[in-house]
Image: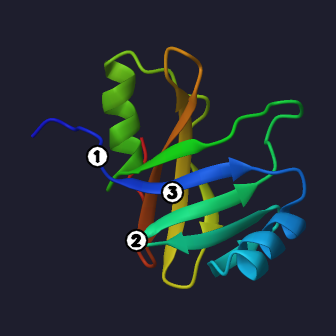
Amino acid sequence: MELGLSTIGQIAITVSQVDQAIAFYRDKLGMKLLFQVPNMGFFDCGGIRLMLTVAETPGETHSSILYFKVADIQQAQREFTARGVTFEREPGLTARLPDHDLWITFFRDPDRNLLALMSEVPRGSAPVTG
């Protein structure tokens, strides 16, 4: 079966002050805070995660990033690279959560909109490398 993206796992919003933004979304909007790590806060939006974060590159601004869930992030990156997609970096471990590790890699569409692949790897297993 040929790989095709469909399920959005996360949407990110770039904010200037993460703690202030978390307080707004949690306290003012009543959204459920899932977890917080340095410079990031994650909320549940009906099964899709909303991530609040500061820009990774100083001066870069964008309102959202679509994160597509894939089972094997390394294999997905290889397949999309073979199709001509250019990735910003290799997949990297972003967060160690109680029952899984979160791996992410980024790429851009023709208009330079930032997109991402994400893989939630259950604890005790590791993503395939190489």
Can you say whether 3 is above or below 13 in the image?
Answer: above
Residue 91 lies, in percent from the top left, at: 54, 44
**Numbered tag placed on residue 116 in the rendering:** none
- Quadrant placement of the N terminus: top left
Report how far apart the C-alphas of labels 1 and 3 lie in the structure.
12 Å
Residue at 72% x, 71% y: name it: 25
Residue at 80% x, 71% y: name it: 24
Report how far apart the C-alphas of labels 2 and 1 lie in the structure.
24 Å
Q: Nearer the viewer, mark 2 or mark 1?
A: 1
Can you say whether 48 is above or below 81 in the image?
Answer: below
Q: Residue furthest front?
A: 28
Q: Secondary structure at mark 2?
A: loop
Residue identifier under label 2: 125
Question: The residue under label 3 is which amino acid type?
Answer: Gln
Q: Secondary structure at mark 1?
A: loop
Q: Nearer the viewer, mark 2 or mark 3?
A: 3
For disc 1, the neighbor class at 10 Å (few under 14, some 14 to 19, many from 20) is few
Residue at 56% x, 85% y: name it: 98
Which one is earlier in the sequence, the residue at label 2 or at label 3? 3
For disc 2, the neighbor class at 10 Å (few under 14, some 14 to 19, many from 20) is few
- Quadrant placement of the C terminus: top left
Residue identifier under label 1: 6
Q: Work out whether residue 79 or residue 8 is closer to the camera in this orientation and state it.
A: 8
